[in-house]
Image (cartoon, rainbow, N blue to C red):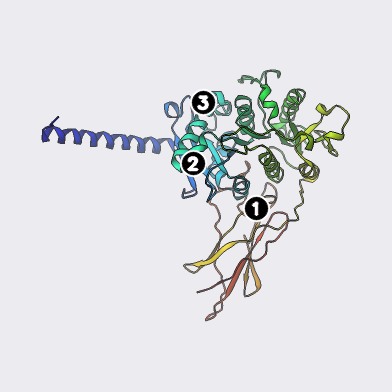
Amino acid sequence: MHIPSAVSSRRSWIVGVVWLLVLAASWLSACVAQEPPYDVRPEIALPYHRVRYEAGTEAGPLVFPATFTVWIPPGVERLRGVVVHQHGCGTGSCSSGLTGAHDLHWQALAAKHDCALLAPVYEQPETADCQLWCDPRNGSAETFKRALADLGRLTGHAELESVPWAVWGHSGGGVWVGAMTCLYPDRVVATWLRSGVPLLEADAARPGTKPHTFPDAALAVPMLCNLGAKEGVRDIDERFKGVWPGNKTFFEAVRRRGALVGVAIDPLSSHDCGNQRYLAIPWLDACLAARLPEEPDGPLRPMAIEKAWLASIEGGAPVPAERFSGDALALGWLPDEATAKRWTAYVKDTRIADDSPPPAPTRVRFENGTLVWDAVADLESGLAGFVIERDGMRIAPLPDNPQNPFGRLVFQRLQYSDTPPQPLPRFEFVDPEPQAGKSHRYRVIALNTAGGESVPSAEASAP
């Protein structure tokens, strides 16, 4: 049908105005919603991607805005799963999730298994009820699944929508990952609950909470309840003294039914995360290796029960499950002997040994007069820093003033909720005292948090 040019121009003008109004509304909405502390976020560039939803209709029934940042391991053709790092309650913990996907140590875990690393942020105001997001039935589960689908389209990895999840959560995040295990047991590879567990139907009611049903399918999901000794075990921090009774009740309720659940008490910490990552990451590594499907879209594999070890939830020497003749369901479950050894060291003093060297830095080069390089974290012990060599002599540690109030010294440093603070440090060094007229040769050595050193990198010469 022929449309007169005047009518066609008018329609084009109307369409243009509508699009401008939509864009303006979106921009204004974003400006209004992005309030402190959620308005300061790391810049996004490949291999990172981010989506954000406003509260209400855009995020379904969720009453808070939500941001999801994902890291995709470079070069992976098809993802096998998603490692989820879930923050806790309050604006400090929630905003700390903005850097969760940028954590080099957690990236090492995800990359080993061809998994994405996902960090959700539920933008909870300080005085709001945490249950409005940490109970997934209040909209966060629906928004989480929507984010996976949208990020799948954005990244070109449509499988993000359907691959299984290995979930880690702190405090309210522990409640969330435990509840997600109840709701979606066939999607969950393993569950780490730091200082937070969901309320089950068998528990006494907590004010403002609805209990969850722990289905039979969840009995096959390996879980570990992890908390600080000061959270009601000993040397008690009054603010968190209810954490231990809640963990113990949860453990006993599900372990008596045969659940693959253990307990690891951090002897040094309270509600902060301390050194838990040096047990959590190897534990999740063992579970991912055992359970991820062998074929795309295949079912999760069962844990090899014959490899399991058992340990008292309050400490002591673990024993192989196949040689134990007592009440196995009174003891905590651990996936294998290597994990049992790490668990023993962790519950004693958190000093988990690591004799393997970290990976050496790569692509050492000069850019605009600055020495830069690439590096990945040691899976077992993370990345503590670097040593700079010039002409075969060590001239500088990096960082030169390492700090971490929550455990071992880490290159990226750590916040209360196990994520690096902003600004994120860069792999770069400027020599403060080069000799005039000389082309120096530089190498970089990586350090892990257990004191191990990498072999030196290849050399780069100053221009």
**What is the residue that sits farthest to the front in this orientation?**
295
The one of 184 and 415 positioned closer to us in this rendering: 184
As drawn, the label of residue 157 is 2
Q: CA distance from mark 1 to mark 3?
A: 35 Å
In front: mark 2 or mark 3? 2
Residue 243 percent location from the top left of the image: 71, 30
Q: Earlier in the sequence, mark 1 or mark 2?
A: 2
Marks 2 and 3 close (CB-CB < 8 Å) = no
Element type where label 2 sits in the image: loop
- Determine which quarter of the picture holds residue 262: top right
Expressed as whole percent of the image width and height from the top left, the position of residue 422 reads 54, 49
Q: Amino acid at mark 1?
A: Val
Look at the numbered disc 3 and give the secondary structure of its residue.
Answer: loop
Report whether residue 229 is seen.
no
Q: Amino acid at mark 2?
A: His
Residue 388 versus residue 93 in the image, above or below: below
Secondary structure under tag 1 reads loop
Q: Which residue: 62% across, 46% down?
A: 106
Q: Are marks 1 and 2 in contact (CB under 8 Å)?
A: no
Q: Position of residue 408 (x, y in %)?
A: 70, 51
Left or right for 43, reference 260: left
- Give me the C-alpha separation between circle 1 and circle 2: 31 Å
The mark that comes first in sequence, 2 or 3, is 3
- Name the N-terminal-most of marks 1 and 3: 3
Q: Where residue 410 is drawn, which disc sits there?
A: 1
Q: Nearer the viewer, mark 1 or mark 2?
A: 2
Query: How far apart, in angstroms, are the residues tagged by discs 2 and 3?
Result: 24 Å
- Per the image, the residue denoted by label 3 is 139
Q: Amino acid at mark 3?
A: Gly
- Is label 1 or label 3 in front? 3
Give the x, y percent position of residue 91: 55, 36
